Image (cartoon, coloured by chain):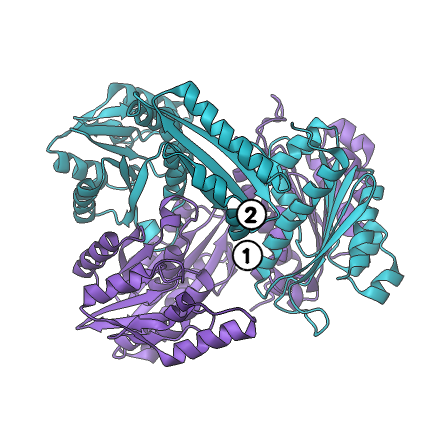
Chain colours: A cyan, B purple
Amino acid sequence: MKAEIITIGDEILIGQIIDTNSGWIAQQLQKFEVDIVQMTSIPDTEEAIFNTLKSASSRADLILITGGLGPTKDDVTKNTAAKYFGTTLTRDERVLLHVTSFFESRNLEMLEINRQQADVLANCEVLFNDYGTAPGMLVSQGNKHYIFMPGVPFEMKHLMEQRVFPLIESQYRDSVIHHETILVGGIGESYLAEEIKDIETELPLTIKLAYLPTLAFIRLRLSGKSKNKSDLVQEVKLFKSKLLHRLKNYVIADYDTTIEAFLIKQFMHQGLTLTTAESCTGGSLAASITANPGSSEIFVGGTIPYSNKLKQQLLAVSETTLNQFGAVSEQTAIEMAAGAKSMFSTDYAIATTGIAGPGGGSAEKPVGTVWVAVAGKKEIITKKFQFNNDRLINIERTRMNALVLLWKLLLKEEGQGHE
Amino acid sequence: MKAEIITIGDEILIGQIIDTNSGWIAQQLQKFEVDIVQMTSIPDTEEAIFNTLKSASSRADLILITGGLGPTKDDVTKNTAAKYFGTTLTRDERVLLHVTSFFESRNLEMLEINRQQADVLANCEVLFNDYGTAPGMLVSQGNKHYIFMPGVPFEMKHLMEQRVFPLIESQYRDSVIHHETILVGGIGESYLAEEIKDIETELPLTIKLAYLPTLAFIRLRLSGKSKNKSDLVQEVKLFKSKLLHRLKNYVIADYDTTIEAFLIKQFMHQGLTLTTAESCTGGSLAASITANPGSSEIFVGGTIPYSNKLKQQLLAVSETTLNQFGAVSEQTAIEMAAGAKSMFSTDYAIATTGIAGPGGGSAEKPVGTVWVAVAGKKEIITKKFQFNNDRLINIERTRMNALVLLWKLLLKEEGQGHE
């Protein structure tokens, strides 16, 4: 099945908003083996909408349109779509009721433009939007399906999950799709590919392997498609176990997760606590942990000792160490991690110290020099990194590699708790 | 002038990478009054590239293509472009020298596919890429200009700034463009529009006003275009001064900046220091400050006292306060800010405490309840917020509103230092 994604909205074309909807939709549709053949962002004009619908339908069977359904958009999307399909707009009573109660519950006056939110294409199936006032719409013509959704990310995601995925799955009623995901770290993509080349060659045509890399981690996703569910699941799991065995030194999780969510789950499972002492990462490491619900159960808190004074005051780093080796040194990183663990009585502590740039470098310690230390129950491990000149990338690489180090020490000290 | 942006690369279409290049290009081109009429992402195939170049050239005068120039991409972009323009590829000696020295300096073996990086369209002007091995290319046919650039963001940005903007400016040799930007906060977009409606109506056709909003701030950009430089600048500045006067209670900065960069500059200018005490924002506030170069001059560091124990230990919040009013309360926020300021001897301190969600809410304090306190030289100000159910949005709104509060107190205590 081939799909296209069309994003309607001037705010994308002037660069005011980055379109993240299309990327999310593409990622999700991967799971259903739907190929995205094009993504197009166009302005709120009749000409652009009409022509883009036409050209997209010449390439794809499934056309997903987001945006252009808000009350202030002059309804150009709905009117143009009506013209394109040779139909009219009609007011949907259920949607109108939903919109009315939305306004009533907020004690807001309802204007005619708000009522128009309930106008839908006469030839459509309404995709009811529990989370907002603009309904989604599905128009099927032969084997071409057009799906109109609001551009607000959480409303779009809701409609995709509740209404669109089931539709796509129904296209595969005669066959089954099964996915298995592995999260690996501490290995580069090309080395990983080399490591599992023979297993990849062995894969039958019904199973595909996708590499989904970030700065320090790679998710490997096996996707199988077949007519027979139990055979398929068994076969995908067989290849998964081969990959798990081959990559045993790099496997973080044998399911689809992020490193942060995985570590929180492991810490929770084993009743462990964590603190962070961030100099060069400046709070981004703690922020990435606390972005996850439930993190407060394992993360007691952290510190950002940016100045030397705070390194001493908060973590008891010794003045001698700072003078003798400098703030960016293995010795300081060790004292930061040890100090944080002891001061806040946690089981584990991560410390980062480095020169993020663009200033502050020297011949001996150029910009991009970073030390990470992780203190555990029994030992402290450290690692030096030499990154480059981009401040934000240096911070992000340090953050991710600090999580890799924490995972390694956790594995060493506690074993693979999730098996 | 009308432009289109084409992004070539399978990694975008499978959702592995979000295309941020197009948004950046669009934002920049706004300044030159170039209208983006479409953004298109397509796969690395001859058919898609050929057809998209053709349809883009029917709508736009300037076609910007990013991606598809890497050594492992089978060079389908360059070969397809050669076919499209009816030309051939030729090896550029200067680029070859650059690629060769790139490999030599890294002691890497150079393969034929690396040499092919120096192959360019025979009819192009080479846009020399100082930062990478793939050169940019400009092909002009009549008044249509095609610009091919690598997809790596910093290489693309370098080429845009060094090679493309001058080209676009040269198109306006007979007229002049001038921009003035104002950063405002503490007012919603629709209220802002109401407030300056009459000034907006007065604007001559040569001056346009753009609203560039984020979650808590709005940048207002005046763009003037005329044949006469001094008149134009004067006229844009006249309207800017009208806006500054009308919006005096909301103006943060009278130039193009971010709230974080603005605050750092103000603190630096006035020799002030800052610390953060983040419960519900979990480090993201400090991370947004330390993302800016030079922040270490004013930011001594911060704390993330997630647990009550750390609120007491790090910031001397009293047990009585925590028991009597709870961790999410005005009293706790005040003690956190006051404690942080006094413990770390800074001039200002920001404290956040709240229920980010999705768990942890109660009838009295539902998810989304947030208190922010800012301690200054003379007083402590506080504000309560009631956000919604989305953890990440709650964190981000708290972070931004905390910066607004800091700005307000700074303004009150120190005055408008930048005037």
Residue toward you, A103 or A221: A221
Residue A282 rendering spot, x and y as whole percentages: 67, 53
For residue A291, above or below residue B46: above
Label 1 marks a residue whose chain is B
User: Looking at the picture, which amino acid does disc 2 mark?
Assistant: Met
Label 2: element kind:
helix
Label 2 marks a residue whose chain is B
Numbered-mark total: 2
For residue B112, above or below residue A232: below
User: Looking at the picture, which amino acid does disc 1 mark?
Assistant: Ile
Using the image, tell me which numbered label, if any, was put on residue B259.
1
Q: Residues within 10 Å of mark 2 (few under 14, many from 20)?
A: many
For residue B113, above or below residue B386: below
Using the image, tell me which numbered label, if any, was put on residue B400.
2
Label 1: element kind:
helix
B263 to the left or right of A171: right
Residue A74 can be seen, yes or no: yes
Residue toward you, A196 or A345: A196
A47 to the left or right of B232: left
